[in-house]
Image (cartoon, rainbow, N blue to C red):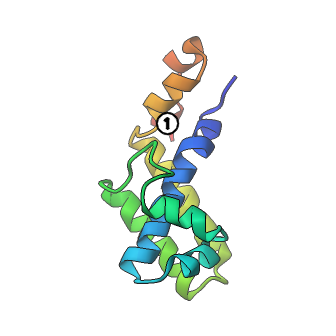
Amino acid sequence: MLLPCEVGVKTVLPAVKALMARTIVEKHGMKEKQAAEILGLSQSAVSRYVTKGRGNIITLENVPEVGQLIDKMTTFLIFEPHKKKEILELFCATCETIRKKGLMCQLCKEKMNKNWAESCTFCNST
């Protein structure tokens, strides 16, 4: 049994990290090395996220609600990194928003057992 959260870890999490990296570099004008330090990643990982060579299985750029959460999260990470609880809550809210909007349902259907996926209502029930 493959759980929706497992699909999320493999698809949504990299997409969120990619959007965070791009936001830090492009919106806040920071260098990839600085973004890497903030996100706890290597500079090469940030480079792959920024150039869309990684974290592009699901597209989140055109989802305003996700963008707002990413903006808040990156602002906390840059200016108030000690607010770990708030950052984690925003991360969870981002994932929940992605699920509620049905953005990962197709990915789940592709990766889960067919019988399980066809009757899954997890994302619609949160």
State the image coordinates of residue 15 (x, y, percent, origin top left). Answer: 49, 52
Residue displayed at 51% across by 65% down:
47
Residue displayed at 46% across by 83% down:
30
Task: Inspect the image, locate mark 1, and give the three-letter code of the amino acid beneath it.
Answer: Cys
Mark 1 neighbour density, 10 Å: few (under 14) some (14–19) many (20 or more): some
Residue pushed farthest right? 1
Among the 4 quarters of the image, the one containing residue 39: bottom right
Residue displayed at 51% across by 72% down:
73
- Residue 106 visible? The answer is yes
Q: Is residue 59 above or below residue 65?
A: above
Residue displayed at 38% across by 75% down:
26
Q: Is residue 2 above or below residue 66?
A: above
Side of 35 relative to 50 (left or right): right
State the image coordinates of residue 74 (x, y, percent, origin top left). Answer: 50, 74
- Closer to the camera, 32 or 28? 32
- Closer to the camera, 20 or 121? 20
Number of on-image labels: 1
- Residue 119 visible? The answer is no
Residue pushed farthest front? 44
- Closer to the camera, 122 or 113? 113
Q: Is residue 114 above or below residue 69?
A: above
Among the 4 quarters of the image, the one containing residue 83: bottom right
Disc 1 designates what residue?
Answer: 123
Quadrant that contains the N terminus:
top right
Among the 4 quarters of the image, the one containing residue 58: top left
State the image coordinates of residue 88 (x, y, percent, origin top left). Answer: 62, 66
Residue pushed farthest top? 115
Which type of secondary structure does the marked residue at label 1 adopt?
helix
State the image coordinates of residue 57 (x, y, percent, origin top left). Answer: 46, 42
